[in-house]
Each structure stands twice: as C-alpha cells, then as structure tokens.
C-alpha cells in the first residue's frame, strides 16, 4: 500500500493507494476506524452502482452503512437538484453532522457528494473512494466540491476536505478505455507543470501505463500525481496563487468544452488540446522552445489524447468563450504557460492578436513519434 498525506494542520488527511485494497477483508476495519459508530450514506452513480453495492455489502460488517443513493451517471447530473436529493436521502436516514458521506465514483460523484456533505446540517464529513482515473489522480484530492449551473460548470460549490481518500485501481477494470486517456490528460498536466522527472517516466512508459500492465508502476504514478497535487493544496488550499498552476491547458480547454457543449467535449480532451495551445502561446512569447512543445504533444498522442486545435472552432469564438469563463476575473485572461517541461508560470495581459496567432499555429505543427 502506498500513502500520501495532505498536510493541512488539524484537517490533514491520508490518501491510501492499493490495488484490490477496497475489497480486502481489512478494508471494512479501516473505514470503521474512521467512522466509528456514526452513520454512513454511500453516494454513487448508475454506472458505478454494482461496484458500490459490492463494497457496501463488505463494509456493513464493520460500518453503519444506512443506505446508498444512486444518481444517473454523467455531467448532466452535476446540478443542484442532485445535491438536494442526496441531502434529502441523508435527512430521511436521520444522518447528522457527525455522519459520513462516502463518495464511490468518478469526479462528478466526488464533487456532488462533497458539496452535499459541506452544506448538510452546515457541514457533515466525507470520504472519497474515486473510481475513474481522473478522480484518482486529481479530483478526489484537494477539497474542491461543486455542481454546475446552466450558466456554466462548477459555478456553485464549497471547499471541504475529505477525512480520507482510498484509491483502488482495480475499480478501473469496468471503465471505458477512453476514460483512462482522460485521466492521463490531468496526470500529464501536473507532471508537465511541476516535475520533469515524472514527465519522463510517463513519456517512457506510455504503453505499459495506458494498458495498466504493471500494477506497481501504475500505483507509483497515482502516488506521484497525488503527492504533487497534495503539496500544491497544502501551500495554497483556496487557490490564491500556486493552485492556479493546476489549470495548465484549462483556459483554452474550458472554452472548447463550452463551445462544443459539455456533453460532447470531454474535459480531458479539452485540456489536452488546451495544453498544446498553451505551448504554442508560450513559444510566441519566447518562454518555451518548440522541441518541448513537440515532447508534450508526443506524450499526449501516446496516451490517445487529441493535440491539435480542432478545425471546427474559430479562434475568435474561443477567445470570446475564454473571456466569459469564471476564472477570467474582471475580464482579464490568465494563462498558465509552460517554460520547458516541468516548469510553468502564470501570465496575464497578453495582447489578443498574440493569443489568436498562437491558436492558429496550434492547428498543426508537431512530428508524431510513435510509442
Ligand atoms: N474537485 C476537483 O478538484 C476536480 C478536478 C478535476 C475535475 N473535477 C470534476 O470531475 C468531473 C470529471 O470527472 P470524471 O471524468 O471522473 O467524471 P464522471 O464521474 O462522470 O466519470 C466519467 C464516467 O466514468 C464512469 N465511471 C467512473 N468510474 C467507473 C468505474 N469504475 N466503472 C465504470 N464506469 C465508471 C462514470 O459513470 C461516468 O460515466 C467533472 O465534473 C470535473 O468538473 C473536479
Ligand atoms: Zn481539469
């Protein structure tokens, strides 16, 4: 079993990583130690339900599991109505402030469950058991919870750190393969931004990792991704500066998602194209050499991620969509730009023409290197 601690003083918590950990006999004891005699509500989505039910049956021996709330899978469920249903289920089951909400699912489940826990009786507790790669490597760590509004994604939410995160890659056995690529978009993002050595490992082992052929290596990758994120969160929990670096590729990516409709363009695919666009912008500003852009593009390609700025989007439309994003504070665009692999910086005040020129360059321009 591998472990990472998110250091936040009294609110510090462990992230434990182990293949088949969640279905071992000792897991009910581990959760029982955290929850004691308090009530637990499991929250999951319709795709993850079979795994969550299996887990519930195992936990019941040592944990006061009062019920399971299942919502229809997908980003379209990530709204206030689902949060309300989770809270009402908790109320019907007589959960109180000391009770636990246990999220078993992808990023949507984790964000919704955390949000419900944050507002139920002004704040209950929650535990994350992420089941998608994106949730394992990124969204289950750091305490951001959210739901979407028709006006935009993640517009409502709260900060609530979980009590613990348990990552079992065995859950991925039932997931669609493109979801593995979506998770690697975020893993490549954090490595490209903070850790050149980690990026090298991902680059070198793309075939083994995307096929989950080496469980120990896969766990190491999850541990390294979580450790990087945990360090950032420990230094800047509420995103006043450093945490914004985790948005590499996201300024462009969110705009692509918005223009395409969030049910059509998956977040990881938007971020992947967005990272390449950010690389081309960094080149325009003299921050990065083209060979580093090619390195990142090749790594994305090896994990079956899209690279080029898709032809169906107009650069001016993307620019407009970026300006309407919630992160464009005061109408100012903020870009996280790479300065070579493993380094990045936040840049504001880039002339519109420079951004548009970089976007056009991102429509082509790297030499594919096959795995
Ligand atoms: N809180 C954060 O810091 C943070 C960070 C990044 C992303 N997010 C959020 O995370 C969400 C994206 O996460 P996601 O890609 O995990 O979305 P998701 O929860 O919708 O999961 C993707 C799909 O995989 C399915 N799935 C998950 N685990 C499975 C399993 N083990 N077996 C079979 N199917 C499974 C889900 O049912 C869904 O269809 C977005 O809403 C995004 O805003 C949050
Ligand atoms: Zn992301």
Image (cartoon, rainbow, N blue to C red):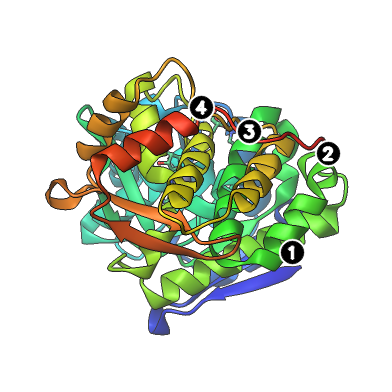
Residue tagged by mark 3? 305
Q: Earlier in the sequence, mark 3 or mark 2?
A: 3
Residue tagged by mark 4? 363
Kindly indicate whether the residue at mark 4 contacts the one at mark 3 (C-beta within 8 angstroms).
no
Find the distance from the CA under tag 3 to the CA under tag 1.
38 Å
Residue tagged by mark 2? 371
Q: Nearer the viewer, mark 3 or mark 2?
A: 2
Q: Where is residue 208 in the image (x, y as percent from the top left)?
A: 85, 45
Query: Of helix, strand and loop, which one carries label 3?
Result: loop
Find the distance from the CA under tag 2 to the CA under tag 1.
39 Å
Find the distance from the CA under tag 3 to the CA under tag 4.
15 Å
Task: Please give the name of the residue rendered at 36% of the width and 61% of the height, measured from the top-left corner.
Answer: 346
Q: In which quarter of the image is the N terminus?
A: bottom right
Q: Where is residue 325 in the image (x, y as percent from the top left)?
A: 24, 40
Extreme residue in the top direction: 312
Residue tagged by mark 1? 26
Query: Of helix, strand and loop, which one carries label 2?
Result: loop
In front: 58, or 346? Answer: 346
Find the distance from the CA under tag 3 to the CA under tag 2.
13 Å
Specify whether 218 is left or right of 121.
right
């Amino acid at each position: 079993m591998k472990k990472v601690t998110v250091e936040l003083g009294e609110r510090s918590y462990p992230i434990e990583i182990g293949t088949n950990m969640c279905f071992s006999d000792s897991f009910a004891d581990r959760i029982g130690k955290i929850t004691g005699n308090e009530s637990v509500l499991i929250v999951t989505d319709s795709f993850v339900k079979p795994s969550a039910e299996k887990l519930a049956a195992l936990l019941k021996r040592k944990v006061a599991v009062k019920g399971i709330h299942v919502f229809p899978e997908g980003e379209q469920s990530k709204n206030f109505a689902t949060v309300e249903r989770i809270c009402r289920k908790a109320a019907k089951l007589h959960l109180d402030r000391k009770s636990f909400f246990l999220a078993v699912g992808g990023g949507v489940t984790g964000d919704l469950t955390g949000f419900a826990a944050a507002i139920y009786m002004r704040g209950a507790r929650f535990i994350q058991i992420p089941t998608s790669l994106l949730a394992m490597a990124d969204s289950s760590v750091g305490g951001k919870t959210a739901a979407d509004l028709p006006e935009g994604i993640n517009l409502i939410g709260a900060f609530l750190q979980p009590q613990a995160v348990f990552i079992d890659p065995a859950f991925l056995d039932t997931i669609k393969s493109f979801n593995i690529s979506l998770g690697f978009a975020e893993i490549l993002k954090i490595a490209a931004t903070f850790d050149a050595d980690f990026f090298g490992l991902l680059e070198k082992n793309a075939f083994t990792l995307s096929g989950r052929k080496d469980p120990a290596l896969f766990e190491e990758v999850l541990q390294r991704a979580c450790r990087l994120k945990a360090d950032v969160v420990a230094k800047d929990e509420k995103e006043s500066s450093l945490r914004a670096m985790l948005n590499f590729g996201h300024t462009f990516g969110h705009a692509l998602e918005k223009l395409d409709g969030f049910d059509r363009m998956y977040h990881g695919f938007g971020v992947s194209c967005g990272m390449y666009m950010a690389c081309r912008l960094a080149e325009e500003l003299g921050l990065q050499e083209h060979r580093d852009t090619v390195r990142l593009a090749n790594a994305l390609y090896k994990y079956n991620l899209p690279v080029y700025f898709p032809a169906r989007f107009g650069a001016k439309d993307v620019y407009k969509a970026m300006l309407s994003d919630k992160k464009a504070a005061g109408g100012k665009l903020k870009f996280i730009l790479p300065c070579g692999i493993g380094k990045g910086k936040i840049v504001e005040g880039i002339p519109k023409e420079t951004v548009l020129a970089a976007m056009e360059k991102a429509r082509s321009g790297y030499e594919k290197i096959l795995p």
